[in-house]
Image (cartoon, rainbow, N blue to C red):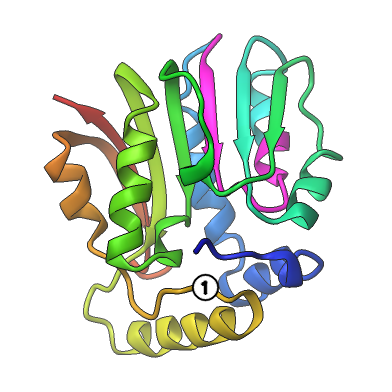
Amino acid sequence: MAANYNNSAWFYDRLSRLVYGRALIKAQVYLLRFIPPNSNVLIVGGGTGWILDEITNIYPSGLQIAYVEVAPKMVALSKKRNAGNNRVIFINEAIENVRLLPDFDIVITPFLFDNFTEQTLKQVFSHIHSLIKPGGLWLNCDFQLKGKWWQKGLLKSMFLFFRLICNIEASKLPDIDEHFEQYGYKIIASQTLFGEFIISQVFKQG
């Protein structure tokens, strides 16, 4: 069962900025520089779609983008964004139920995996992996625990809030790095933000 952020669509961006400032935005914008021109891009869990505005600032044309988001209200907001002359297909469905050709140069998963238990993540990860071209890049950002006292408390509060409001199934961070290692991905670039609580990583197979 995928999380559904319909109930938070109207306040999600404002809440994230209240808690994290611009850290969640910076984490995702950092990854966009790794998108080559004329790429076929898959965005999974794009939320309100502001990332489309940021992509258009870099590439006003030339990209093909499949935008997969499970919450209808998030998709409605995303369709109002500026995609320039890039071709965007909006898909309102959980990614594990979406059938696409395996020809994506770039996959972007912004704060996606913390919604899932380990069991669901195995299915979701394997399906996304099957859609990437050989040599393609997987751009991922998420939360991580680095031993700071406040991180566990903040993370616990986040999970509790979104389980109540959005019915997410997770109650702890899954071991995301283990899945990337299992499928043979290597980190080629990364950065951390917000006291190392947020991490952006660029993965490539081989």
Q: Is residue 186 magenta?
A: no
**The residue under label 1 is which amino acid type?**
Ile
Tell me the residue at 86%/40% (across/down). 80
In the displayed structure, would residue 85 be above or below residue 56?
A: above
Which residue is rendered at x = 41% and y = 51% of the image? Answer: 141
| Residues rendered magenta in the picture | 38-53
Residue 12 on image: x %, y %: 70, 67
Q: Which residue is mark 1?
A: 168
**Horizontal side of residue 162 vs 119, given as left or right:** right
Q: Residue 185 appears at what percent x and percent y?
A: 19, 35
Q: List x then y, in percent, for residue 113.
A: 40, 58
Whether residue 86 is visible here, answered yes or no, is yes
Residue in the picture at 65% in, 18% down: 59
Q: Relative to 133, is 165 on the left or the right?
A: right
Classify residue 49 as left or right of residue 1.
right
- Work out whether residue 34 can be spotted: no
Q: Secondary structure at mark 1?
A: loop
**Is 47 colored magenta in this rendering?**
yes
Q: Quadrant of residue 24?
A: bottom right
